[in-house]
Amino acid sequence: MPRQPTIVGQPVLLVIDIQKGAFIDVDGGIPHMPGFTENMSRARRVVDAAHDAGIPVVFFQEIHRRSMVDYGRELDGSEDIHCLEGEPGTPVAADEMDMRPTDYFVHKRRYSVFFGTETEILLKGLKAETLILVGAMTDVCVHYSFVDGHQHDYYCRVVSDCVGGTSPEAHQASLNAMEYLQEGAVMTSDDIIAAMSATKLAAE
């Protein structure tokens, strides 16, 4: 198959789990690779470009009840308790990302943005064809969301310098796995911003 265009049809930006914990010191939780906070901060450029181009933006927040009833098997691996209701690191980083009233917002209890959420209904309503992914973590929520988007037949693009993993090795391995599924899927912020700007020009 020939490589697909960067953006096919209607794009939607998915801002996955960029929460206050990315910008403040939080005890325990999930390990972060070096440069994680810088990558989360850089995602603001992509959000700004989407706003400027009129591309819908969907913010996702991982959040768990304080009773911990909805963690499931999530704590069986390397992750400690994280994203509890009422904790300072759990809210979406709305100020840092310029989250607007016109943006969409979805809670999730699991890694993938598709699992047990309204995402599929929302994306159908938005007539989405291309999903642009930024956020955390590259090797967990971003990767799982990419795979589910791929299996739902969306064109998926992940912004390599606007996602962050639990380690450099896990980050790169997941980018490699996503590129394997859709050739050309892994892009830099400069490249995706240029593509988003081109959609605006084409619509004018």
Image (cartoon, rainbow, N blue to C red):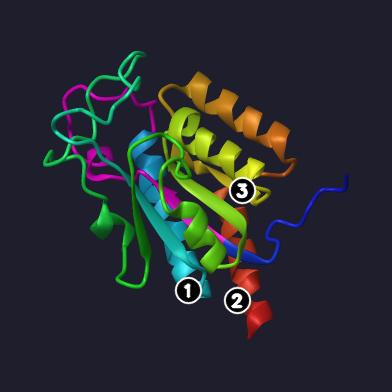
Secondary structure of the residue carrying numbered label 3: strand
Q: Earlier in the sequence, mark 1 or mark 3?
A: 1
Please state if 142 lies on the left or on the right of 68 as rendered. right
Contact between marks 1 and 3 (CB within 8 A): the answer is no
Secondary structure of the residue carrying numbered label 1: helix
In the image, residue 61 lies in the stretch drawn in magenta: no
* Numbered label attached to residue 157: 3
Of 122 and 154, nearer the camera is: 122
The type of residue carrying mark 1 is: Asp
Spatial separation of the CA atoms under disc 2 and disc 1 = 8 Å
Query: Residue farthest to the right?
Result: 1
Contact between marks 2 and 1 (CB within 8 A): the answer is yes
The type of residue carrying mark 3 is: Arg
Which quadrant holds residue 82?
A: top left
Which quadrant holds residue 174?
A: top right
Spatial separation of the CA atoms under disc 3 and disc 2 = 18 Å
Q: Earlier in the sequence, mark 3 or mark 2?
A: 3
Q: Position of residue 183 (x, y in %)?
A: 75, 40
Secondary structure of the residue carrying numbered label 2: helix
Please state if 126 lies on the left or on the right of 178 as rendered. left
Q: Which residue is the site of mark 1?
A: 52
- Decide whether the magenta segment is chiefly helix, strand or loop: loop
| Residue 2 seen in the current view | yes
Which range is magenta? 12-35
Q: Which residue is the site of mark 2?
A: 200
